[in-house]
Image: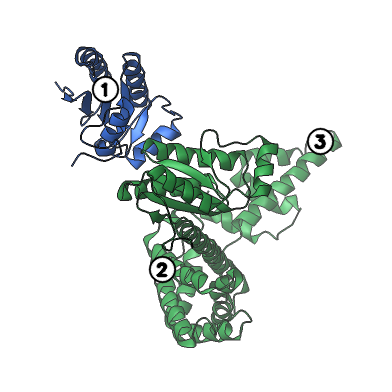
Chain colours: A green, B blue
Amino acid sequence: MRPEDADDLQSLPPGSLDLGAMSPVIFRYKPDWGRMTALNTINTNSSTKKFCITRLALEIQALIHHHRKKPTMPQINSKTVEVLTQRTKDVLEDWLRAQLASATLRLDLVSENELRKQSHDFLTLFATACEASKLQDINTPQWDEAPHWKEVREYLSSITFSRARQGFSSSETATFVLSLKQPLFSHLRQLMNSNSEELIETMWTVTVLIDKLALLSTENYQQGREEIIRRQQQELLELSTPVVKAWDGVLILPLIGTLDSARTQIIMENLLQTILDSGSALAIVDITGVTTVDTLVAQHLLKTIAAAKLMGADCIISGIRPQIAQTMVHLGVGFGEVATKASLADALAESFKRLGLTVGSLQAPA
Amino acid sequence: MDTIPILQLDDFLLISIQVEMHDRLALQLQDELTERVVKTKAKGVLIDISSVETVDSFMGRMLGNIALMTQLLGAETVVAGIRPAVAITIVELGLSLPNVRTALNVNSGMAMLRQLAGTSVGGNGHERQPE
């Protein structure tokens, strides 16, 4: 399409249905449309004619809309870059003011100086990235890989992660980026007061960009929180499975809480390693602290005991409470061949017996 | 070509597996071991696998088979020195090895064999190595 076609279309009043005024352009630009216009003059049935004309009007309107002179992209971006580079200080001050005034500010978690430093560093990176990329690529998939934006994203991620750890809420974290909109917009408005269309386009670009960053920030926040949960779970697992040496050759494994497959795995590894290290021939698995024993828990326990047996250590299960004994029988769950005792003391006495040890009072009964 | 040595210790045979097991080696071991059990009238077989880092279902089945074969020939089998990771793998594979007796190490494995055979060499029958 030649540029003068666009100019001609531009000169047409939008929404005009005056085919007479449009026809020179139409004939020049699209011969087949011209043929359609010719229907106007030849003798055809009127409903066909009406349809053709309506159709033509719609097509032309679409064309006009498409070619209405848009502010070109570089122009928008240069303004944004200008605001960011030449008015950095003002934007930063306005941004800080907005953040300090916002209801989501948490001065108890982050100091004003720290906030200032974070804002300054982020804005510097942001301006550099805008300048380097000319904001051309924000709507393309390449945005995710662009090197200048990578730095911005990484810095934002580091802020987000630290905030997630400090106990900010997700909206408090996202506000950091979102509050940049208002100062940016007000400066853009000052700069482009004359051209409202250009201003709207610019604002749209900047909105898309900042929303992307805010979404990223929210996503990172969630990741940060999930990481905390995972770490705590891991710590809980490690804390909750001690293996205690009760006597030379006798280990006690007090189990507390619920037994799932992940925990069973850790418990098993712990127990087997301790059996190997201490050379114990007996292990007492105490389930006093286990809240429920169903088929799955029993299966996990039996697995652990079978593995210990392979290592050459016998196991005794102790601490089966009356209520649990009843439930197990009702469920038809059993521990098979494994020796079971009601209390830890009974199990210890049994293991002494197996080792050929006796416990006696120092003072002979009178 | 690897071979697994079978050592005789009084009435018992001692095997220490220190190479990676594969089908041919396992079959060869089964052949040799059954012959030696008959020839030496051994009362027990001790298999030390403390050097074995990984185990598969083949290896597990082989241990069970050897135990059954020696039992048929009138000898007990003790497997000693199963590592934690190996024990977990065997359990996860669902191999319970019902005929196999296990011991923590060669020392307690020998003690167990002596007790099973009803002989007490230089001791009182407890699980202690002779002084």
**Eye-nearest disc, 2 or 3:** 2
Which is more toward the observer, B56 or A45? B56
Give coordinates of residue A63: x percent, y percent: 64, 51
- Above or below — where is A31 with respect to A212? above
Which is more toward the observer, B105 or A174? B105
The residue sitting at the right extreme is A46
**Eye-nearest disc, 2 or 1:** 1
Taking the image as shown, residue A56 lies to the left or right of residue A199, namely: right
Q: Distance from label 1 to label 3 (Cα)?
A: 85 Å
Residue plotted at (61% across, 43% down): A30
Badge 1: residue crowd in 10 Å (few <14, some 14–19, many ≥20): few
Residue plotted at (43% across, 45% down): A353
Q: How many marks?
A: 3
Residue named by callout 1: B22
Q: Are the residues flagged by discs 2 and 1 from a single subunit?
A: no
Q: Distance from label 2 to label 1 (Cα)?
A: 60 Å
Name the chain under label 3.
A
Q: Which of the labelled discs sits on residue A129, or is there none?
A: 2
Which is more toward the observer, A329 or A74? A329
